[in-house]
Image: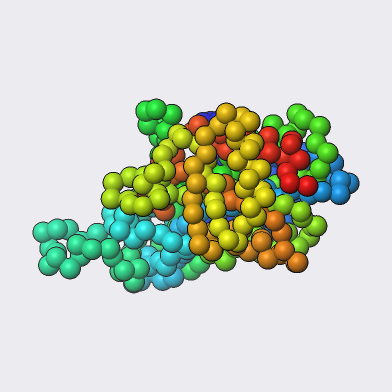
Amino acid sequence: MEELIFDLLEHKGISGDESGIARYCENRLKNFSDNVKIDFNNNVVAVLGDENADYTFLLDAHIDRIGFIVTEIDDSGFIKVDKVGGVDLRTILDAPVTVHAKEDLNGIVCCMPPHLSDGNEDKAVSIDKVWIDVGLPAEKVKKAVSLGDSVTVFSKPKELINNRIYSAGLDNMAGVCSLLKVAEKLSREKINSRVIILLSCQEETFATGAKTVPFNYEIDECICVDVSFASQPDINDQYSRIKLGEGPMLCVSPNLNKDILNKLKATANKLNQNCQFEICNGRTGTNVDHIVVNKSGIKTAVISIPEKNMHTQAEIIDMSDIDKTAELISEYILCGGVK
């Protein structure tokens, strides 16, 4: 599984530019389903189980990540960008980046040396002050780079001790990895329902995949898999109790279906698996907020993989939480859901 998620993390598909990661996921899913396709928005859809069944599950995880978009190239060759998704600008100064132009270009986000600073730079930089230096003269930059090209923060995934890894993009390659493992598990079983796996585009910006793909199907239940916050210094209240390696997080919200939640709890107990809980008072901040109102409404649930340092280049997860999430979802579907 570590090899799988490291492969996923090699594909830098920010919102609106997911073609590379979409093709990779399509090829992986073809090992488990004869019905896999990519639509024009780069949503990847695979159908497993009985395609003629009268009960349909939708499993969703988004394949896009946060990043930047090129908005200007000045006369000195510096590249100005804007955010694509919720980039944490506190972490971006002097960060190495990759400009995905005609050819990938390595660059560095410009940073004021402390010797020249008047102290006003000692806080999160505003996006209008983020410039990228790729080390080329302006005429070469303008030939190589186009307005609208995407930019990602460079991060090579690394192992930590105790079954943990860190990297940019674990939001939401952790969720994608779990659903690829679900596909593998379910492909070996006889399923009496139809299971649609949606690896969706543009969650970090407009939730295009979540808003459009479900309209093509009559869906009875949906589970969205994403990441959410784990305990780290200075985090208080409910997230201070969320631990890496202690199992997936089940979301409790007025917008989510309580029957699915209770069945997920019972399935976890059957597996002797621990679950953690995230309490929301309405919106969950995931794709489920859009899927729940699809057509006349869909019964929904959210399962999250605990993560530290979200939306930075050093997100941390525990690999065992991905495996437990895949095991829980697979067993839930094999037990028939709440039909």
- Residue 220 image offset from top left, x and y in percent: 76, 53
Residue at position x 55%, y 57% from top? 253
- Residue 51 image offset from top left, x and y in percent: 85, 45
Q: Is residue 192 left or right of residue 307?
A: right
Foreground pick, 234 / 63: 234
Foreground pick, 333 / 200: 333
Residue at position x 35%, y 68% from top? 127
Foreground pick, 314 / 127: 314
Residue at position x 66%, y 61% from top? 292
Q: Is residue 257 left or right of residue 334?
A: left
User: Where is residue 162, by image quadrant?
Assistant: top left
| Above or below: residue 77 compared with residue 102 | below
| Above or below: residue 33 compared with residue 210 | above
- Residue 281 image offset from top left, x and y in percent: 50, 62
Residue 314: in sight, yes or no? no
Residue 291: in sight, yes or no? yes
Q: Is residue 143 left or right of residue 185?
A: left
Give the colouring mode of the picture: rainbow
User: Where is residue 115, by image quadrant?
Assistant: bottom left
Q: Quadrant of the N terminus?
A: top right
Tally of numbered discs: 0
Residue at position x 67%, y 50% from top? 259
